[in-house]
Image (cartoon, rainbow, N blue to C red):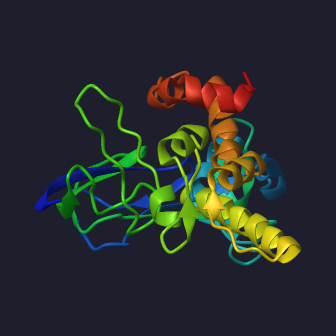
């Protein structure tokens, strides 16, 4: 099996709620942050123009934050007056998502923060709010690239021919150092569609727990087998499903401009649709 050093182009999808991202031409190291953002829940209306005693059309002059900006609890959103000032402050940490025509502010509380890190060192060759693409050099072993789709250092599986569908997977690396017997990685890969690296790690840990319980009950040491991993897979729900469900709602109600057509196309894939609808 020969090693080959070559150029690879890796696209890193970005979740919804982007706050900042890398720019084209930027050099990035392995593990460098390519994008960061937040996950927010239902927006809350905060009366602003009426509370300040101004016309809605004048709100733009006194507003201290822009739509889309992250805000912290207690920060000033709008302020008027010098001698006798009046101000509207943020009631919680969140993001300003909308300013209404009647002068109200809509704030969405932050429930989670996310980071997307580069899976290889290189240079950013394309950057949009949907994905950041990095081009760099990496070692490969007969169609296996030394970077991964969900964790730095994970090997991504290749395919035998150009007509086959590429299905990167991490179970082969998650099982490294674990004694196994009769494990069919391809069958497990098909059964673990949409699983992230953390999901796969949880699957292996559940399988190990099952083996340990068997050893304690019987006193006989056994390796991790196909049945242990298959049973563990059935107990783990892909953590990406919650995000995909939110993305589906966003596409359904907020895609009038067609900005999220690519996301809509991805959600229409059979594997994704089957996981989201159960059929």
Identity of the residue furthest to the right in this view: 217
Q: Is residue 270 above or below residue 38?
A: above
Q: Tag count in the figure? A: 0
Q: Is residue 149 above or below residue 202?
A: above
Q: Position of residue 192 (x, y in %)?
A: 59, 44
Horizontally, residue 3 falls left or right of residue 53, namely left
Q: Position of residue 173 (x, y in %)?
A: 45, 64
Q: Is residue 249 above or below residue 238?
A: above
Task: Point out the image quarter for the N terminus.
Answer: bottom left
Task: Point out the image quarter for the C terminus.
Answer: top right
Front position in the image: 53 or 153: 153
Q: Position of residue 112 (x, y in %)?
A: 68, 62
Residue shown at 50% from the left, 75% from the top = 177
Place residue 162 in its image quadrant. top left
Residue shown at 59% from the left, 31% from the top = 272
Place residue 102 in its image quadrant. top right
The answer to whether residue 11 is seen in the rendering is yes
Front position in the image: 278 or 141: 141
Front position in the image: 33 or 175: 175
The answer to whether residue 19 is seen in the rendering is no
Q: Position of residue 98 (x, y in %)?
A: 65, 44
Residue shown at 42% from the left, 46% from the top = 129
Residue shown at 81% from the left, 49% from the top = 44
């Amino acid at each position: 099996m020969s090693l080959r050093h070559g150029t690879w182009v890796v696209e890193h999808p970005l979740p919804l709620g982007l706050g900042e991202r890398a720019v084209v031409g930027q050099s990035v190291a392995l593990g460098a942050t390519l994008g960061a953002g937040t996950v927010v829940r239902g927006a809350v209306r905060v009366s602003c123009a009426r509370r300040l005693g101004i016309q809605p059309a004048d709100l733009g002059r006194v507003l201290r934050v822009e739509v889309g900006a992250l805000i912290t609890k207690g920060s000033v959103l709008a302020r008027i007056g010098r001698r006798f000032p009046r101000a509207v402050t943020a009631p919680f940490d969140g993001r300003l998502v909308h300013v209404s025509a009647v002068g109200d502010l809509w704030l969405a509380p932050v429930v989670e923060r996310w980071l997307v890190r580069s899976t290889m060192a290189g240079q950013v060759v394309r950057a949009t709010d949907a994905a950041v693409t990095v081009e760099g050099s990496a070692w490969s072993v007969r169609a296996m690239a030394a970077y991964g789709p969900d964790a730095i250092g994970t090997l991504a599986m290749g395919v035998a021919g150009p007509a086959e569908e590429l299905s990167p997977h991490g179970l082969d690396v998650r099982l490294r150092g674990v004694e196994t017997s009769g494990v069919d990685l391809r069958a497990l890969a098909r059964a673990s569609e949409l699983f992230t690296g953390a999901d796969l790690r949880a699957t292996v840990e559940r399988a190990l727990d099952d083996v340990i319980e068997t050893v304690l009950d019987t006193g006989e040491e056994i390796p991790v087998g196909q049945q242990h991993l298959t049973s563990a897979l059935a107990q783990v729900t892909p953590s990406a499903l919650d995000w995909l469900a939110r993305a589906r709602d966003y596409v359904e109600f907020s895609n009038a401009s067609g900005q999220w057509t690519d996301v809509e196309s991805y959600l229409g894939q059979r594997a994704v649709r089957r996981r989201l609808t159960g059929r």
